[in-house]
Image (spheres, helix red, strand yellow):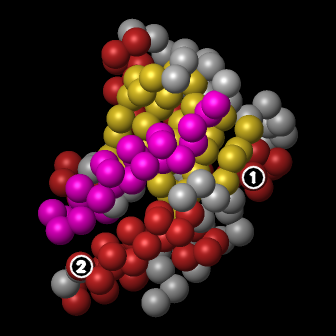
Amino acid sequence: MNDNHEYFMDVALEHARAEIGIGGRPIGSVIVKDGKIVGRGINTVVADKNPSAHAEVEAIRDACSKLRTLDLSGSTLYTTMEPCPACLATAILEAQIKRVVLGGRHARLGRKDLGDYSVESFLAFTKRDDVAVIAGVREAECDQLRSEWLRSLSDKQLRLETLRSLSA
Ligand SMILES: [Zn+2]
């Protein structure tokens, strides 16, 4: 079966792109099961003043609510940015998602707040060898979206985001 990773990443990118210019952080995620999108999420941390409202969590909530289950076995998560440790540990693994397709990488952006973290390093640390990671799908587009977003921020917003996570 053709997985069509680029197509589903494009959908996630579309959701992410809609956040530029309205104050959100442009990260989008979709959950795909049996070739169909069953959950969609964007990062609503700023809009909802909710530090845990990451795109991955929102997509998982959406899928669990639509499918009326806690168990998303057999699903694939597509996300424009590498999932953070919280999303990976408490949402993705808890929901039994065993395949993660990602675009952008924290390390490539020079984020300092996550140290040496990567999805793979976390999975190795927790001895999880049952989760497949497919990286680099639409990577350039995901990175470009982040650059566009940074350019769209006011000086004050940029300072706040830089303080939070970027290497300046
Ligand atoms: Zn997260």
Task: Indicate which label's residue lies in the foreground, 1 or 2.
Answer: 2
Q: At 63% from the left edge and 72% from the top edge, which residue is drawn?
A: 107
CB of residue at label 1: within 8 Å of ligand 1? no
What is the x, y in percent for residue 22?
Answer: 15, 63
* Magenta residues (range): 2-25
Three-letter residue code for mark 2 = Ser
Residue drawn at x 81%, y 49% is: 125
For the residue labelled by badge 2, is the local secondary structure a helix, a strand or a loop?
A: helix
Q: Nearer the viewer, residue 34 or 154?
A: 34
Do we see residue 84 in this rendering?
Answer: no
Q: Where is residue 49 drawn, in percent x and y?
A: 22, 53
Whether residue 13 is in magenta: the answer is yes
Task: Say which of 1 and 31 sits in front.
Answer: 1
Q: Name the outermost residue toward the left.
A: 22
Mark 1: which amino acid?
A: Glu
- In this rendering, the answer to whether 94 lies above or below 102 is above
Tell me which residue sits at (36%, 35%) in the image. 40
Rendered location of residue 122, percent (x, y): 73, 50
Front in this rendered view, residue 116 or 105: 105
Label 1 – label 2 distance at C-alpha: 31 Å
Q: In what element is the residue under mark 1?
A: helix
Q: Is residue 57 above or below residue 20?
A: above
Q: Find residue 152 and name its label.
A: 2
The quarter of the rendered structure image containing the N terminus is: top right
Residue position marked by numbered label 1 in the rendering = 120
- Rendering coords of residue 138 (x, y %): 54, 58
Locate residue 100 relative to residue 166 in the image: left or right: right
- Residue 21 magenta: yes
Is residue 14 visible in the rendered image? The answer is yes
Please give the name of the residue rendered at 57% of the width and 42% of the height, measured from the top-left corner.
5
